[in-house]
C-alpha cells in the first residue's frame, strides 16, 4: 500500500460519523446493509449518510453493490486489513535496532 492510498483511507475514517458507519458495516459482516438499515442503526440523516458513504467508498474502505433500485454497502475487510498492516508493518523496528546495538 502506498502512502497516498493509506492517507486517503485513514482520512475517510477520521470523522466520528464515518467511523460509526464503518463500524456498523463491520458488525454486519460480509452481507452488508442497505442504506436504510445503516440509517436506522446510526440515526444519521439520509443526505448526510449519503455523503459519508461516498467518502468511505471513495477511499476504498466501503464497497457498494447495486441490486435493482437498492444499494448494499459492505465494509471492505481486505482494504481495512491492509490499512492496519500499513500502520503496524514497522512496529518496534527502532526499539529492536536499539536493543541489537546495545547487545553489541
Image (tube, rainbow, N blue to C red):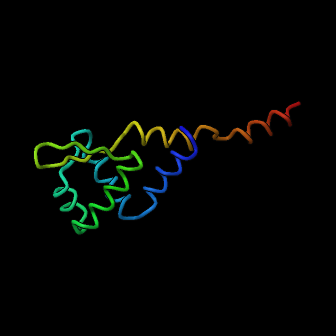
Count of numbered marks: 0
Q: Nearer the viewer, residue 7 or 85?
A: 7
Q: Residue at x 25, y 63 (%)?
A: 42
Q: Residue at x 23, y 69 (%)?
A: 45
**Residue at the far left in the pictured view:** 68
- The spot of residue 77 in percent (x, y) is 37, 39
- The spot of residue 65 in percent (x, y) is 22, 42
**Residue at the far right in the pictured view:** 104
Q: Nearer the viewer, residue 94 or 66?
A: 66
Whether residue 34 is situated above or below residue 96 in the rendered picture: below
Residue 2's image quarter?
top right
Q: Residue at x 49, y 43 (%)?
A: 83
Q: Nearer the viewer, residue 50 or 95?
A: 50
**Residue at the far top in the pictured view:** 104
Residue 104's image quarter?
top right
Residue 5 left/right relative to 62: right
- The spot of residue 92 in percent (x, y) is 67, 41
Residue 73 left/right relative to 87: left
- The spot of residue 95 in percent (x, y) is 74, 41
Amino acid at each position: 500500500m502506498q502512502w497516498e492510498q493509506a492517507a486517503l483511507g485513514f482520512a475517510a475514517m477520521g470523522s466520528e460519523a464515518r467511523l460509526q458507519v464503518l463500524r456498523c458495516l463491520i458488525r454486519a459482516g460480509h452481507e452488508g446493509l442497505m442504506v436504510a438499515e445503516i440509517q436506522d442503526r446510526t440515526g444519521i440523516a439520509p443526505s448526510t449518510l449519503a455523503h459519508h458513504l461516498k467518502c468511505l467508498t471513495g477511499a476504498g474502505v466501503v464497497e457498494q453493490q447495486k441490486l435493482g433500485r437498492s444499494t448494499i454497502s459492505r465494509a471492505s475487510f481486505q482494504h481495512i486489513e491492509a490499512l492496519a498492516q500499513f500502520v503496524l508493518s514497522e512496529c518496534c523496528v527502532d526499539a529492536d535496532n536499539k536493543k541489537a546495538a546495545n547487545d553489541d
